[in-house]
Image (cartoon, rainbow, N blue to C red):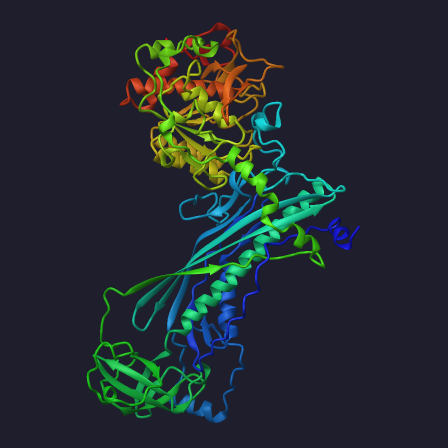
């Protein structure tokens, strides 16, 4: 075996695509006079990956900016307190006895005068890895920022994956692969991986994962002399990919987690370095300015000296109402200088700003009013009521890190993105489809159905359809694994791409289902087609993808999905899943829905537990009036007990029961599956609620909920499992 292969058995290889080595930029000359700047510390903002690893940018950027300015030799950096000064790395000049004597004589005790205040605000920090439907998003943007992902770590993600293999989550078994054939689900594709094929060559496994990183920082430089505000948006971004080899799957997964964390750190370290350099280069463009501290018999004392690099003979320009005066330094001390007027003669005042100039004395220096085009120094007699604000944007390219084996042979052989291109194209076409043109989807009257399956017959849905009540005008949001919005029996429920929903796991506008869970719920609510109708076939649907194929989610995705659903007009939100972990994100999201008169229909859960004894959320939250908790029944109208009782229950908490066992449901790519679960029962209730509400759209949420529950049929055999033994009915 070659040496390169042997190395990979005990290590992980990580590299990005081959890039040409950029030519080093010529160093810009450092101005002799040190600019004095004040830097406000940044609020630290963190990005958190799936495995809980974090990177903090605020303090990092502040420290890097201070050190970059300091190391350049061209700046004096002030801390918040004026008496705390960080001088450049050059040695400070020790005062001799004569200077101390003169300093005492002139009463020098000056703090450096800042030419600018520098502030920065982190607006975006993202690290997205994987591709297409298996992409995973971490961090925050301006449009996707909640208290659970805004980077301050006050409210962190409550649902990190339990393992780096992503095969388990905090959520129940409803997100396990469904069906016997691999093509029915994404079996074999690891969540978040662009190309998890588990390829085995002589016992060696590999993973490859592309990533995209962004960091947006708004730098605000306030030029104190002329009160102008320079705002520059620093937009850093970069792409790369990770590649790992390992002898076993578990070793590979653990090593790959370390690899991803390394890439995260090195990528953002690079962005911080470049941002600090960009801000430094901006500050070099501003002229050296200081102020007049005293005017007396000794001369004109200015607040700049050897610490700023002032030399005897340096000239400074003063502008008062267009009248220019030129001053020249005659004596220079450590923290101040004495100057004299050599031309002009405008009325000088204490605290007036003067600017270093290398121009020769001209007519403008003889006290003659200058035009705005020739006057360069600030007018110290002009009061600026509305400071000028200049906004610019600077693109910064982040160079991704590269790691590889000693001779690079494997890198040369396998680093091409085309190695996985056939798989990626297949994956995209199957599980991350583009939003198809809606012309091919037509709504059909449900009364054309020749027969109805038992679940629809049991809830007496024809009573509503016969009165032309089909859910028209009502929007239901499905917060789940996505929906196949191109399914021939579901596509009509999505009016346009812009109104289809969003994917808050991969962070894009393709909320396509790669599990089949969300599509099953959508079909029960709004299915269309001969003998394939949902409960409310004219309902409009929104799909918010908050779960990857294995049920992994984030607090931010859950909360943001609720927020977006409410903003986009949903009257009903369906949560066909449960978790044993209580969540602030869930509670705040449901509370937000309650405040906006939105009803939330939730599944009771599928472990056969009494909710009075074992909590399952969100069904176990008792403080919200807008929750409708749903259990499952079978064809015999009894609680579902397939392979032992699977429907959770409670005579105090579960509001209603609905069909949920052995149902024919829709699946992605026009597939049909047989499934069971309280999620399906909850979908029936969401559809029935849409019918009730569409009959009287002006009705409030509380009245719609009460009407639905009052219409329910009481069943004695269900009294121990739901309040009043209620069974969903549209009688």
Count of numbered marks: 0
Tell me what residue is drawn at x 38 percent, y 88 percent: 314
In the displayed structure, 223 sits above or below 216; it is below
Apparent side of residue 405 relative to residue 31 in the rendered image (left or right): right
Q: Which image quarter: residue 448?
A: top left
692 or 382, nearer to the observer: 692
How far across and how far down the image is residue 389, in percent?
A: 30, 63
313 or 397, nearer to the observer: 397
In the displayed structure, 8 sits above or below 713; it is below
Tell me what residue is drawn at x 44 percent, y 84 percent: 309
How far across and how far down the image is residue 60, in percent?
A: 52, 60
Tell me what residue is drawn at x 65 percent, y 47 percent: 256
**Quadrant location of the C terminus in the rendered image:** top left
Asked whether residue 381 is in view, the answer is yes
In the displayed structure, 59 sits above or below 185; it is below
563 or 483, nearer to the observer: 483
Asked whether residue 629 is in view, the answer is no
Q: Which image quarter: residue 251?
A: top right
How far across and how far down the image is residue 328, in percent?
A: 34, 90
How far across and how far down the image is residue 587, in percent?
A: 45, 33
In the displayed orientation, state which residue is furthest to the right.
1
Apparent side of residue 670 relative to residue 300 in the rendered image (left or right): right
């Amino acid at each position: 075996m070659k040496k390169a292969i042997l190395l990979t058995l005990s290590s992980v290889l990580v590299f990005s695509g081959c890039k040409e080595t950029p030519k080093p930029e010529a160093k810009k000359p450092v101005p002799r006079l040190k600019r004095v700047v004040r830097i406000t510390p940044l609020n630290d903002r963190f990005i958190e990956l799936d495995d809980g690893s974090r990177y903090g940018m605020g303090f990092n950027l502040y420290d890097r900016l201070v050190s970059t300015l300091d190391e350049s030799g061209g700046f004096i950096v002030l801390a918040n307190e004026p008496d705390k000064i960080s001088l450049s790395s050059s040695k400070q000049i020790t005062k001799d006895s004569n200077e101390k004597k003169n300093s005492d004589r002139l009463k020098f005790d000056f703090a450096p005068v800042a030419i600018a205040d520098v502030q920065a605000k982190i607006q975006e920090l993202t690290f997205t890895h994987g591709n297409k439907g298996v992409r995973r998003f971490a961090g925050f943007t301006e449009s996707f920022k909640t208290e659970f992902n805004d980077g301050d770590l006050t409210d962190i993600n409550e649902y990190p994956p339990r393992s780096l293999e992503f095969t388990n989550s905090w959520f129940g078994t409803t997100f396990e692969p469904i069906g016997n054939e691999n093509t029915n689900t994404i079996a074999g594709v690891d969540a978040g991986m662009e190309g998890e094929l588990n390829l085995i060559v002589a016992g060696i496994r590999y993973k490859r994962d592309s990533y995209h990183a962004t960091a947006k920082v708004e730098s605000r430089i306030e030029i104190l002399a002329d009160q102008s505000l320079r705002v520059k948006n620093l937009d850093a971004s970069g792409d790369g990919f990770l590649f790992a080899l390992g002898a076993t799957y578990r070793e590979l997964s653990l090593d790959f987690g370390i690899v991803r964390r390394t890439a995260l750190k090195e990528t953002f370290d690079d962005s911080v370095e470049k941002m600090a350099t960009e801000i430094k280069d901006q500050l070099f463009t501003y002229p050296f300015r200081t102020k007049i501290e005293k005017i007396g018999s000794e001369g004109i004392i200015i607040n700049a000296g050897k610490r700023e690099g002032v030399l005897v003979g340096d000239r400074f320009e003063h502008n008062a109402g267009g009248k220019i005066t030129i001053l020249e330094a005659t004596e220079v001390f450590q923290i101040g200088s004495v100057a004299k007027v050599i031309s002009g003669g405008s009325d000088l005042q204490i605290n007036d700003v003067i600017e270093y100039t290398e121009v020769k004395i001209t007519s403008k220096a003889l006290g003659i009013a200058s035009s705005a085009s020739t006057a360069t120094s600030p007018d110290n007699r002009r009061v600026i009521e509305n400071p000028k604000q200049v906004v610019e944007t600077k693109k910064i390219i982040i160079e991704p890190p590269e790691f590889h084996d000693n001779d690079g042979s494997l890198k040369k052989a396998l680093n091409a993105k085309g190695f996985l291109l056939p798989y990626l194209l297949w994956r995209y076409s199957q599980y991350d489809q583009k939003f198809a043109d809606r012309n091919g989807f037509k709504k059909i009257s449900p009364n054309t159905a020749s027969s109805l399956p038992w679940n629809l017959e049991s809830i007496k849905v024809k009573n509503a359809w016969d009165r032309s009540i089909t859910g028209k005008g009502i929007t239901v949001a499905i917060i789940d694994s996505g929906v196949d919005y191109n399914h021939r029996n579901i596509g009509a429920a999505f009016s346009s791409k812009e109104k289809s929903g969003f994917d808050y796991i991969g962070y894009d506008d393709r909320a396509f289902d790669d599990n089949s869970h969300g599509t099953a719920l959508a079909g029960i609510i709004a299915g269309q087609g001969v003998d394939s109708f949902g409960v409310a076939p004219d309902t409009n649907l929104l799909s918010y993808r908050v779960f990857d194929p294995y049920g992994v989610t984030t607090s931010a995705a859950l909360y943001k999905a609720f927020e977006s659903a409410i903003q986009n007009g949903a009257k009903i939100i369906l949560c066909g899943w449960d978790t044993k972990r209580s969540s602030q994100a869930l509670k705040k999201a449901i509370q937000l829905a309650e405040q906006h008169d939105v009803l939330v229909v939730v599944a009771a859960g599928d472990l056969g537990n009494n909710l009075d004894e074992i909590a399952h959320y969100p069904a176990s939250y008792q403080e919200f009036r807008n929750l409708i908790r749903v259990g499952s029944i079978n064809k015999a109208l009894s609680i579902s007990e397939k392979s032992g009782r699977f429907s959770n229950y409670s005579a105090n908490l579960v509001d209603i029961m609905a069909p949920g066992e052995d149902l024919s449901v829709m699946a992605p790519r026009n597939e049909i599956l047989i499934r069971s679960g309280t999620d399906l029962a909850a979908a029936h209730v969401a559809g029935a609620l849409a019918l009730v509400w569409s009959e009287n759209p002006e009705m409030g949420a509380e009245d719609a909920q009460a009407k639905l529950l009052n219409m329910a049929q009481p069943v004695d055999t269900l009294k121990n499992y739901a309040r009043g033994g209620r069974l969903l009915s549209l009688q």
